[in-house]
Image: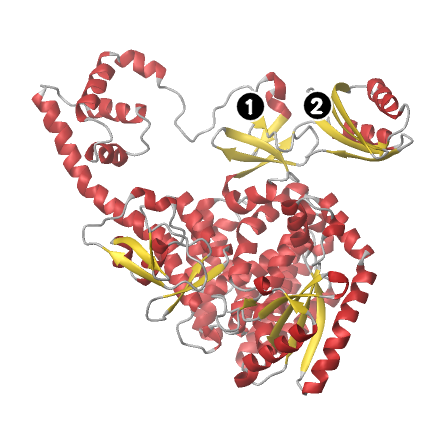
Amino acid sequence: MSGNNLIDRSEFFRLYGKLYSFLRQEWDRRKMSGLKELLRRSFKKAEGQPDSKTLYYLALVMRTAVIIIDEIGLKQPAVCAVLLFHSAVDGDYSPDEIRRLFGNEVENILTGLKRVNQFSDKRTAVESENYIKLLLSIAEDIRVVFIMIAQHLQLMRDAKETASSYKLDLSVQSTYLYAPLAHRLGLYTIKSELEDLSLKYTDRERYDFIAGKLNETKRSRDRYISEFITPVKERLDKTGLKYDIKGRTKSIYSIHNKLKKQKIEFESIYDLFAIRVILDAPADQEKAQCWQVYSIITDMYQPNPKRLKDWLSIPKSNGYESLHITVMGLDGRWVEVQIRSKRMDEIAERGLAAHWKYKGIKEETALDSWLGLLRESLEDSETNLSQKLTDFKLDLYDEEIFVFTPKGDLFKLPKGATVLDFAFAIHSNLGATCVSGKVNGKNVPIRHILKSGDQVAVNTSSHQTPKQDWLNFAVTSKARTKIRQLLKEEAGKQVDIAKETLLRRMRNRKIEVDESHLMQLIKKLKYKTVTDFYVDIAFEKIDVNWVIDRYLELESKESESRESHASVSAGEFTLKTPSPEFSGADELIIDQNLTGVDYKLAKCCNPIFGDDIFGFVSSQGIKIHRVNCPNAYDLFSRFGYRVLKARWSGKTSSSSYTIVLRVIGNDQINIVANLMSIISKEEGVQMRSITIDSNDGLFQGNIAVMLGDTSMLDQLIKKLRAVKGVKSVSRLN
């Protein structure tokens, strides 16, 4: 840990004062006395061991507690649980003492935090089993995950001076779990900061480029915002409304995402900012005043009706309420305007923590429903971890649509939801017997994708049962979980019938069954489970007599079979010397200290010796990617549990790697010859190919070279950039 992350006496007392004043607002003298003693003892213990982790953890705990207060808005029990955590783990306080001194709520939160901590310290890389445990703790008390998000945010803030491998671990966790969770819980500001820091730690060059561009254009952007806002203010002032109006720049990550997806230059992005109007309105007038402001702005500027987002009439399931419009501003530039009340703005900044039930609200909320479905999905013991994680991820980031029953009841579903998802959302039995739907009066199949505003009726049949292919188009976790449960129930019935059928046929042919040989056959036929094998027999996907013939062949060639099938079972890594293209076994170290593992260098980013890298477990084995690979964020966010640490061993490479340089310059005599001359003279560098295009006085070329490591690459790029007439030299992918 960096020394900059430790806590000194002055900061300790500053944080102590803030936490003390917050807690004393609702806590009695007895509780405050106990907490005061705890903090003083912690600092004294930490100060006496400046070289240990104690001082760092004290800083982390106190800063995390401040995030919980200022940026999430949790109440006293959650803050106290954070401050007590390490003392409780060290045994300074027993559960009974905590309940007696601070109450049951604090002890319950601590129990959840302890459960998460039991696995979170063992390995920092994202592991699916660990996160299933974390998700289960979410479903028990949501405050546990708010605290985990706060602590992770502080770890990300503190990681600036840490090792690149540690920053990669944190960034994978951010993109795979914590940023999506923050999004789902309405913590948009924290989500954006986690994404920005992840980009900063994994692709610093890209981050600095966008940050620099934003800084360069700040003056003109501020001037444009001022020119847009001034006439709006004049009109709003005449209404007598109480309001605040300001501009907000998009996050660096969201700009990066837009540049990557749309393949455009920075200068082509016009919606770099949004205007936000925040009304100080009584609760019963919030919506009316928001629509009044909408009317004023759309009178002044031409609106884009396709970009209207009305989360006033129907809030998002995470509590977000706002009215978003996009209007044509000065110079023909589109400008997004967000209109909301102060209450709505607090929820937008702090998420569900701003109004959830532990502040006294007892009614059923959309979050309660989501947590219930989450628990049901995660506790399904028959579903494998990968499927559970996929279902969970589907429910995190998706945009919502709003559809109605024929009677007008409203249902919120993720974007891409089908008639089948709608049927399961109403009731599991309705989903299980669904045969088709009627959308806006027209008959449609069950895989029909719904749109916001659709009115949907479900057609059922008593003869209908769930089919395996339903999992290909059902998108909600409730539908997918229930379909798998019903399929397994049906499969269980069919398995018994199939077993009996196979044994009877074998007895009829006077064959004595050897269970070990049968298991070998099932593995040879590439079935993952015995159940899958019998299900295929039951549904006549494989013929019983064909199976018996294969069994007899296996018995007669038992010795040969043992030799040919003694390979490593599916899913494990094959340990062997890497191919010569990637040098000897010690060139690369994967995971903890694993060498000699078969791997391939990913073609999407072509890593070379010296690059910051990570391993990814794909269906073709382990692929090695650069940390700033164009596909890295997608891999982190969707498959974070497959990411492995990887690093180059030694200081120099014994192999050569092919990379492609993109060179842009003035189309002048001898410039290409000069470039080729430099490459030919560079020790350890070999030219592979060159392609040049010339247009309007500029040339653009791709030069493929072979070299040993990043230091050679950096030196070559530096020399090529110094050639007269060259405008830029960059590495492709």
SS state under label 2: loop
Q: Can you give x and y, in whole percent of width and height, for residue 462 in the image? A: 18, 54
User: As drawn, is 582 to the left or to the right of 118?
Assistant: right
Residue at 78 percent of width and 20 percent of height:
685
Query: Could one spot residue 731 in this view of the protein?
Result: yes
User: As drawn, is 475 to the left or to the right of 52?
Assistant: left
Callout 2 crowding tier (Cα within 10 Å): few <14, some 14–19, many ≥20: many
Amino acid at dot 2: Ser
Residue with the mark numbered 2: 653
Amino acid at dot 1: Gly
Q: Can you give x and y, in whole percent of width and height, for residue 706 in the image? A: 72, 21
Residue closer to the observer: 57 or 681? 681
Compared to residue 480, the image places residue 249 above or below, namely below
Residue at 62 percent of width and 75 percent of height:
294
Compared to residue 161, the image places residue 572 above or below, namely above
Marks 1 and 2, how far apart in space? Answer: 16 Å
Query: Could one spot residue 57 in this view of the protein?
Result: no
Residue closer to the observer: 336 or 674? 336
Residue closer to the observer: 676 or 230? 230
Residue with the mark numbered 1: 596
User: As drawn, is 229 to the left or to the right of 102?
Assistant: right
Compared to residue 230, the image places residue 479 above or below, namely above
SS state under label 1: loop
Mark 2 or mark 1, which is nearer the start of the sequence? Answer: 1
